Amino acid sequence: MSLLKYILAIVFAAIYVCFGYFLERENFLHLGVLFGASFGLYFFFIATTSDKRETDILLWVSMIFRIIFIVAIPCLSDDYFRFIWDGKLFVNGFNPYLFIPSEIINTDVAKTAGLTQELYEGLNSPNYYTVYPPINQLLFSIGGFFSKFGMLAGIIAIRVPILIAEFFLIKYIRRLLEDLHLPHYHVLWYALNPLVIVELSGNLHFEGMMMLCLVVGIYWLRHNKWGGAAFWWAMAISIKLIPILFLPVLIKRLGVVKSVWFYIITALALAFTFLPFLDQKLIEHIFSSVDLYFRTFEFNASIYYVIRWLGFKSVGYNIIQQVGPILSIVTFVLVMGVYFYKNKSWEDAFKKMLFAYTIYLLLATTVHPWYVINIVVLSVFVRNYRYALLWSVLVILSYSAYMEESYQENMFLIAVEYICVLGWLGFEFLKSKKLSH
């Protein structure tokens, strides 16, 4: 690797120090400058690196970037308060799925579990049951246990498994690229991506851990290890529910009979992860939280915001209660339509998963920046589609909402984000169709 690249890598690292220890979420200008500089370096490195040895060096450098955040307090997300809250409940013998924070903060449950008023005030959804699946809850319990030594100790305890998962995800992306006979340096699209590094290692989100389980599951499927693949798919669902969306892709790849057996094994393994939390009210509370998510929350949406605007014009109020569930049904129908087109190779399967998740995001009422990380991973295995990398840059515009205490979104910036992403996606789609003929 050239001297220039080593110098730029040091600059890159300095930017992550600023992200981790000097950035305030309300300072959108500061955030924009840091992300702009980091993505400029990112595109330079991925555009100028194809040598295998240089790629190996940059992969280790990318892990150093992640480790920079080891003792940082997340600054772009306050979800970690709920992580610690749920973890404290579980390690003290309480089922986190059974309690709404606002209902127990002044009770003996909170006192026994060490749930403080300070921790409660940091929660962004104190009136809802937790929505995080079982593997997440087990990870939260590690943070809940170590948080007795201070909030930072709890954060570090959750961050370490995320860092370990990132290491193995990068490793398995590399292996799967070799399996699919795709260029090895595509791994850098994920490994060096600033959105990935800041949101996962910095802000403690679990998309990387989920995608690790999914990538390992697909890798094992390609090597005919059915039981292990189903287990890993179940673990992915038990971290984030999103991989349920990808299960239909197996019907074309494996056939109906094998797919059914795969689904059965996956369901059994998933059910096993729920055993520590088993309760007659478990399913009811989880579904109530998921239902509230679709009917209540809205952030950085695209098609939904257009529908909402039309709703205000026609009926004079926010129609999310009606539209949210309808959009989820439309998403299901469209995604199933995507899966039943030709699927001759695993690269075709990845392309369908990429499009399916893109449809999900475009019809969602809430698209947090870290949601885009999933399509960054999927795009690594697909030729001719790079819109996910553009989206990983532009989704940062959604953080402009935090400039004001009222969290007012800037609809002009949201429009810029989606017009550019959809325009580039359309261009790549037409270009790909032309190349295929």
Image (cartoon, helix red, strand yellow):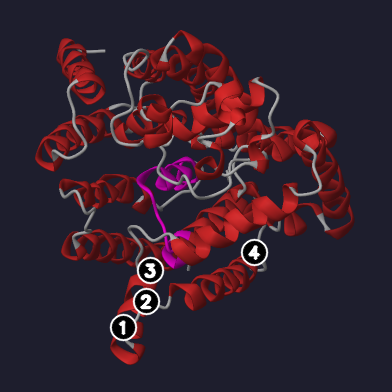
Amino acid type shown at disc 3:
Leu
Task: Identify the mark nearer the N-term, 3 or 4.
Answer: 4
- Residue 327, relative to residue 220: is it above or below? below
Magenta residues (range)? 361-380
Q: Mark on residue 430?
A: 3
Residue name at image x 33 percent, y 33 percent? 193
Percent coordinates x, y for residue 77 in the rendering: 35, 37
Q: Are marks 1 and 2 in contact (CB under 8 Å)?
A: yes
Q: Report crowding for label 2: few under 14, some 14 to 19, many 20 or more residues within 10 A (C-alpha).
A: some
Residue name at image x 30 percent, y 79 percent? 309
The residue carrying mark 4 is 339
Task: Identify the mark nearer the N-term, 4 or 1.
Answer: 1
- Residue 157, relative to residue 75: is it above or below? above
Q: Mark on residue 318?
A: 2
Circle nearer the viewer, 2 or 3: 2
Amino acid type shown at disc 1:
Phe
| Depth check, front residue: 315 or 306 | 315
Q: Are marks 2 and 3 in contact (CB under 8 Å)?
A: no
Disc 2, SS: loop
Task: Identify the mark nearer the N-term, 1 or 2.
Answer: 1
Residue name at image x 58 percent, y 54 percent? 289
Q: Report crowding for label 1: few under 14, some 14 to 19, many 20 or more residues within 10 A (C-alpha).
A: few
Q: Report crowding for label 4: few under 14, some 14 to 19, many 20 or more residues within 10 A (C-alpha).
A: many
Q: Residue furthest front?
A: 107
- State the separation of the CA atoms marked 2 and 3: 36 Å
The residue carrying mark 1 is 312
Q: Report crowding for label 3: few under 14, some 14 to 19, many 20 or more residues within 10 A (C-alpha).
A: few
- State the separation of the CA atoms marked 1 and 2: 6 Å
